[in-house]
Image: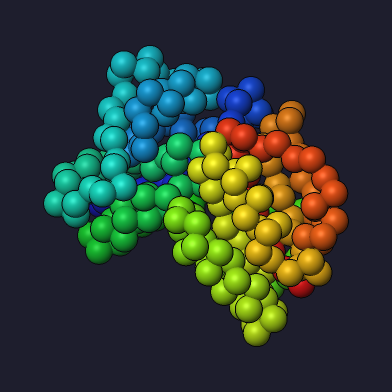
Amino acid sequence: MKKGKLYLIPVTLGDNNTISKVLPAYVLEVLRNLDYFIVENSRSARRFISAAGHNKAIDELTFYELDKHQKNQNINAFLQPLLKGISMGVMSEAGTPAVADPGSEIVNVARQNGVEVVPLTGPNSIILALMASGFNGQGFVFHGYLPVEKNLRIKKLRELEANIAKYNQTQIFIETPYRNNQMIETILKCCKPQTKLSIACDLTLSSQWINTLTVSAWKKETVNLHKRPTVFLLFK
């Protein structure tokens, strides 16, 4: 039996009112013709799919909720429709699935089962922030979340600074939104004055804000990013 396809469906980075601005028509066409979805959060996925104008009532669709600690045997159970010839969609909580997202494990298991994986175009905060930073876009590393413990975080930031000089790489990382201000404070205290810091906040939303300055220049600014999705980038 021919297997279904696994579509990696991007979603908006925030307000669903931006759907028509950031998602190509083809993505919405694919979405509206799928009945099975693997998602991070069923409630937000239902809201997004409804806003995207799915062809069926939301209660007629099937959702499998993926936890980042999910075991492979559960993932295999999720993929059963694919093995019966039914295509499925994978959706992140925001942006593109499988990048800084537990959806990557779904893709891994699907490939092990010989399923065709189809990535679709949409907003990715990491790439958008890099594009707008003015930093090296040919050599960069995404580190995800830095350590929460203060001394370990300082150690990691100094390691990132060393990597900038050693490898000429842009260093990219994120933080839980309610700790953004603490992150900025730590960067300004421990990084070298000449190091450049780019901050990209609320990407693609009406409140979008992006700026790139040296650490010494940032110290003269007043910035409040509390509870606002933000990407941080360091370069020389």
Q: Is residue 135 visible?
A: yes
Q: Is residue 10 visible?
A: no
Left or right: where 207 falls relative to 51: right
Left or right: where 37 falls relative to 201: left
User: Is the residue 56 above or below the residue 233 in the image?
Assistant: above
Residue 8 location, x and y as percent?
44, 47
- Toward the bottom, the furthest residue is 166
Residue 159 location, x and y as percent?
57, 74
Front-lying residue, 125 or 21: 125
Front-lying residue, 30 or 105: 105
Count of numbered labels shown in the rendering:
0
Colouring: rainbow
Figure quadrant of residue 232: bottom right
Which residue appears at 42% of the width and 46% of the height?
7
Front-lying residue, 214 or 188: 188
Q: Quadrant of the C terminus?
A: bottom right
Which residue appears at 67% of the width and 76% of the height?
164
Front-lying residue, 123 or 161: 161
Residue 201 location, x and y as percent?
68, 41
Which residue appears at 50% of the width and 57% of the height?
150
Which residue appears at 31% of the width and 60% of the height?
108
Left or right: where 192 falls relative to 38: right
Residue 107 location, x and y as percent?
34, 56
